[in-house]
Image (spheres, rainbow, N blue to C red):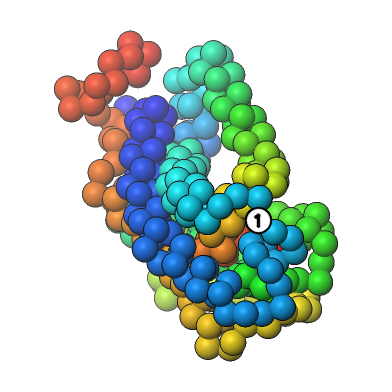
């Protein structure tokens, strides 16, 4: 299989390779992580991560 | 194939996360407490109200959060993004990993820091938190866009037979535009911390993220690339029939 390796060939390859169920699980995981990041604004979590936010330089206040 | 890339991204992310968690434990936590204890006008964590949790909880959760932060970046950048963009990322082998790490640092931290630099406890921007978060998100997207354009410019110049130094110079154009545009935005900050401490703090924040990306790239390079042409072999416990068929 001497085929040129490009970004679009990777996309094609992933489409063939991954089942609909795996894609659904992956998207659910993305949704879960996004939700978790939103929950980080809740005061208890926010204050618990205070040192991390400053060490990581993610300071919005 | 995709699964093996994600697996490697998660492994690199675990290593990077452990390294960054350790960094939070031995450098971040003590430094933030020291800056807080320097007697500025504010009281407690966050500078606006008393903290809802104890210092011990904050230390522990911040270490755990640091580990997850590294894992998240590893999974996204070196799992998913690396799979799709590997053919387009400039360089070969190990270089590709460090180019991606540099792009990750620029996108996730560098670009937002151009307008919202890391601030020590006790110093705050004039923006309200929603605006600041939205601005942070916009700058992450701007950073991603600048990095994609930089990679695209490099690849185009190389395919037209331009030498590496000139192609690198061409790829720096979008990044320079990003920096120049950010100079137009100036957000006032309020609060005071001794200048030396503010500098030390900023250095720690920059070093921490740079170190995390370097660990991610190095561990990922050390894990090697799954070869597209090679069928799944006994080294990988990835025994799914779908990938045997190609």
Residue B165 visible somewhere in the drawing: yes
Q: In the rendered image, which quarter is residue A29 located in?
A: top right
* Residue at screen point 71% across, 72% down: B42
Callout 1: few (<14), some (14-19), or many (20+) C-alpha neighbours within 10 Å? some
Residue B37: x %, y % from top left: 56, 74
Q: In the rendered image, which quarter is residue B187 located in?
A: bottom right
| Relative to B129, residue B79 above or below | above
Considering depth in this image, is A2 or B123 the residue closer to the camera? B123
| Relative to A36, residue B47 above or below | below
Residue B171: x %, y % from top left: 54, 68
Residue B1: x %, y % from top left: 37, 28
Which residue lies most toward the left here?
A: B234
Considering depth in this image, is B244 or A22 the residue closer to the camera? A22
Considering depth in this image, is B7 or B34 the residue closer to the camera? B34
Quadrant location, the C terminus of chain B: top left
Asked if residue B61 lies left or right of residue B20, the reply is: right
The chain under label 1 reads: B
Residue B150 visible somewhere in the drawing: no
| Relative to B110, residue B140 above or below | above
Asked if residue B17 lies left or right of residue B170, the reply is: left
- Mark 1, secondary structure of its residue: loop
Which residue lies most toward the bottom here?
A: B195
Residue B94: x %, y % from top left: 30, 56
* Residue at screen point 60% across, 50% down: B53
* Residue at screen point 70% across, 47% down: A43
Considering depth in this image, is A50 or B34 the residue closer to the camera? B34
Circle 1 sits on which residue? B51
């Amino acid at each position: 299989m001497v085929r040129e390796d490009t970004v679009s060939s990777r996309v094609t390859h992933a489409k063939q390779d991954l089942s609909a169920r795996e894609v659904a699980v992956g998207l659910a995981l993305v949704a879960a992580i996004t939700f978790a990041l939103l929950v980080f604004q809740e005061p208890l979590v926010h204050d618990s991560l205070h040192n991390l936010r400053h060490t990581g330089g993610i300071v919005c206040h | 194939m995709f699964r093996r890339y994600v697996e490697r991204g998660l492994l690199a992310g675990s290593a990077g996360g452990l390294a960054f968690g350790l960094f939070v434990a031995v450098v971040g936590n003590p430094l933030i407490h020291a800056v807080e204890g320097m007697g500025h006008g504010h009281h407690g964590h966050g500078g606006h109200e008393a903290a809802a949790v104890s210092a011990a909880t904050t230390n522990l959760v911040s270490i755990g959060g640091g580990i997850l932060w590294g894992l998240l970046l590893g999974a996204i950048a070196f799992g998913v993004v690396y799979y799709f963009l590997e053919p387009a990322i400039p360089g070969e082998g190990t270089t590709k990993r460090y180019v991606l790490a540099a792009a990750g640092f620029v996108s996730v931290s560098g670009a937002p820091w151009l307008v919202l630099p890391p601030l020590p406890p006790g110093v705050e921007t004039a923006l309200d938190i929603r605006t600041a978060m939205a601005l942070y998100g916009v700058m992450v997207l701007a950073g991603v866009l600048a990095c994609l354009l930089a990679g695209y410019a490099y690849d185009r110049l190389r395919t037209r037979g331009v030498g590496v130094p000139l192609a690198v110079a061409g790829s720096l154009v979008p990044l320079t535009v990003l920096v120049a545009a950010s100079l137009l935005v100036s957000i006032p900050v309020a609060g005071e911390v001794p200048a030396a401490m503010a500098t030390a703090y900023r250095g720690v924040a920059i070093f921490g993220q740079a170190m995390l990306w370097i660990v991610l790239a190095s561990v990922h390079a050390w894990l090697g690339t799954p070869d597209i042409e090679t069928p799944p072999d006994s080294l990988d416990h990835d025994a799914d029939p779908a990938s045997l068929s190609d």
